[in-house]
Amino acid sequence: TKMKVSVSVSLLLLCFVCRVKAVTIESCPLATGNLLRTEVEKTLTLTCITDEGIDPSNQNELQWFRNGARVNLAEENRWSRSSLCVQPVTKEDNGVVFICQLKGDASVNSSIEFDVQYPPDLNDTKEVFVEETSDVVLSCDVRANPPVTVAWKKDGEVLDLTSGSYKTTNNGITAQLSITKAKRDVHQGTYICEVNSSVYGIMGRTFNVTVEDKVLRFPVGPTIAGVVVVLCTIVFALISRRNKIIKCIKPN
Ligand SMILES: *[C@@H]1O[C@H](CO)[C@@H](O)[C@H](O)[C@H]1NC(C)=O
Ligand SMILES: *[C@@H]1O[C@H](CO)[C@@H](O)[C@H](O)[C@H]1NC(C)=O
Ligand SMILES: *[C@@H]1O[C@H](CO)[C@@H](O)[C@H](O)[C@H]1NC(C)=O
Ligand SMILES: *[C@@H]1O[C@H](CO)[C@@H](O)[C@H](O)[C@H]1NC(C)=O
């Protein structure tokens, strides 16, 4: 029995001495591993808690970092336990990493990463006017998390991109459809960049494209040049006749 007690006591001591120092982050809503999934406009709270293994008297001051930048904490929100509130969550918070660490020992730390879901900002109609034989570009902001797929449709049907008069690009931020040398019978109509989100479903921006007659504009540049030439001619004519005019007024 003596032996057993002594072993227990030493185990207990051992436990106390080599207790691993740690900080843990609790979040609301709950994170999966260290990934916290949320949506824009939501409110999040993060609470960093020191393990009891940390000497409560002076070594338990906590620090928070948001993407490496220190977060200012009120004096009463630093010791043993520290809470942050993120409100409202924005698109810019997507991918942000928060780290909580002991001020005196940065190796005692814990981190959490935000996965902010948001739909693309696309739910409107644009009126587009283009002259015959001119070019036009239709643009959609397709930024979203999770990323979306994009399909271009004209009058309800998926566009045939092999015909050559259309070109599409999509860099994950902006999706564009370029029309070169617009022709009314081919290009006029209602276009849509239809995005498909696994979370938010189908959305899109509608473009009502009207192909207008080519306007024969009054050529401003050449007109001005012409007027200048005419004016100069008149001035030179007057100057060359000046002597004669003066002579007429002041006869010798
Ligand atoms: C967090 O702690 C680990 C080891 O526990 C260390 O490698 C890492 O550099 C620490 N991170 C920071 C930001 O100090
Ligand atoms: C799109 O806009 C219409 C009217 O402006 C609105 O009723 C609808 O809820 C919006 N849809 C989305 C997905 O935002
Ligand atoms: C949207 O994508 C899902 C798969 O993510 C697919 O099952 C569905 O048919 C798509 N809808 C349209 C209209 O393309
Ligand atoms: C598109 O434009 C045409 C001509 O300007 C107009 O008649 C039509 O009502 C418009 N459609 C929509 C959906 O705005």
Image (cartoon, rainbow, N blue to C red):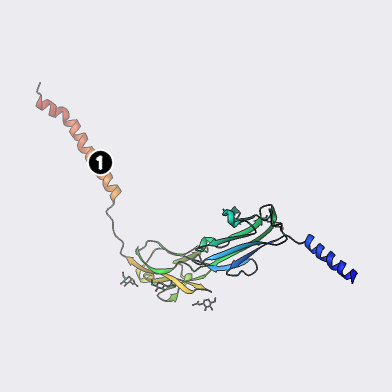
Front position in the image: 126 or 220: 126
Residue at (21% x, 35% y) in the render: 235
Query: Which residue has dot 1 on it?
Result: 229
How crowded is the residue under tag 1: few (<14 C-alpha within 10 Å), some, or many (20+)?
few
Q: Secondary structure at mark 1?
A: helix
Front position in the image: 201 or 9: 9
Location of residue 48 in the rendering, given as x and y in whole percent from the top left corner: 63, 61
Apparent side of residue 85 relative to residue 4 in the rendered image (left or right): left
Apparent side of residue 26 relative to residue 8 in the rendered image (left or right): left
Front position in the image: 87 or 136: 87
Q: Is residue 204 visible?
A: yes
Q: Quadrant of residue 211?
A: bottom left
Q: Is residue 159 visible?
A: no
Location of residue 94 in the rendering, given as x and y in whole percent from the top left corner: 55, 63
Apparent side of residue 160 relative to residue 84 in the rendered image (left or right): left
Three-letter amino acid code at the position of disc 1: Val
